Image (tube, rainbow, N blue to C red):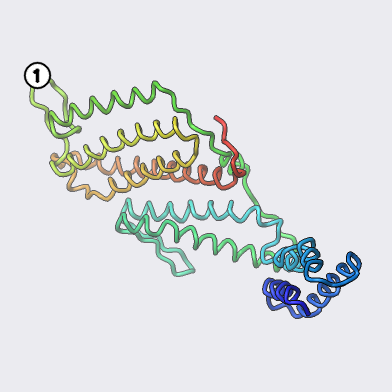
Amino acid sequence: MSKIMDDYLEGIRHYLGDRTDTEEILAEIRSHLLEKTQNDGGEVTDAALQDAIEEYGSPRQVAARYLEESHIIHPTYRQFLFRYTWLLFAIHYGLKILSFVFGDSFPIQPFGLDIHVTRWPDLFIQLPFTWIADFGLVALVFYLITQNPTDVRLAWPRFFRRSLKPVKMRGAEPWKLWAWITLLIVLLAAYFRNETLFFQTIDFKKPLTPLLQPDASQTLSLLVLALVGFEIITLLLRIRFRSLWVDFANTTVYMISFIFVLAIPREQLFLDSRLLFLADLAAWVIGFTLIILAYDLIRILRTVLTAKPFRTVEK
């Protein structure tokens, strides 16, 4: 037998896996190819056999024809796979963000899981692994549903169909760029003059009273300046590159920055201890903002991953 035929059938065997009828399938394919080659050329040559194989399909494509009835996840459920993964991920990772913000844990019974995050670097390290774990869980559920002979209708609320619409490309109007540049100049002037951007009161006739403790004040002031500078860079990138990856990077940087702010102990923020209630209020606001940013990030990723190659998302 030709080596070309042997290699081709071996490739198909690989993709068929451990089916009990593998040998019968390979024999059928071998017979079909030989018959086609003889009909086309009369003599079985390597060139004629190669042409027949190319026309018949790659080993993976051929094996797929015989595996259509043995799905791991049925095609009717595949459209829901990533939808439910992102939904579960939003809930799962949202609990991790809340755990970090409020220093609490969330036990999940009866699975014996305990969601508890104490350090902001752990929050980012766990992000991809959380998504992978949620994807695996959803895939397992869909596998079990596929093996069930009963038809199962999966719910997908209309709210999610409406809310997860593709993200449109954000504009890069020149006036926005100049507005952010002006704001950066004003903030830089204020920072170099007072070494902080946070004050209890603003009275130009008297020395300004700082709002935060020195270390926290300098750190947060520099963070504000960095974010304003980053927003200017983002606007410039939007002018140069029409890509949603720019918005993805922008949203990611803001999420990292806000989580960094939440990592600062509340006792190290205000000079006046009577203002500590503002730290709790700010934590709630930032936590809610993080949820919005995470949702926006999901919409951006969904738009990018479902867009056709080389397709431009119009404004």
The quadrant where residue 271 appears: top left
Neighbours of disc 1 within 10 Å: few (<14), some (14-19), many (20+): few
The quadrant where residue 220 appears: top left
Q: Residue at 48%, 58% (x, y): give it.
A: 131
> Residue 252: where, in percent of width, then height?
40, 45
> Residue 199: where, in percent of width, then height?
17, 31
Q: Residue furthest top?
A: 205
Of residues 232 and 309, the one nearer the viewer is 309
- From the viewer's perspective, tell me whether residue 122 is left or right of residue 312: left
Q: Is residue 196 depicted above or below 284 in this figure?
A: above
Q: Residue at 30%, 58% (x, y): give it.
A: 118
Of residues 138 and 187, the one nearer the viewer is 187
Q: Residue furthest left?
A: 206
* Residue that badge 1 annotates: 205
Given the image, on which type of amino acid does mark 1 rest? Answer: Lys
Q: Is residue 17 depicted above or below 90 in this figure?
A: below
- From the viewer's perspective, tell me whether residue 314 is left or right of residue 283: right
**Numbered circles on residues, count:** 1
- From the viewer's perspective, tell me whether residue 151 is left or right of residue 203: right
> Residue 55: where, in percent of width, then height?
79, 61
Q: Is residue 290 depicted above or below 68 in this figure?
A: above
Q: Residue at 82%, 78% (x, y): give it.
A: 27
The quadrant where residue 191 appears: top left
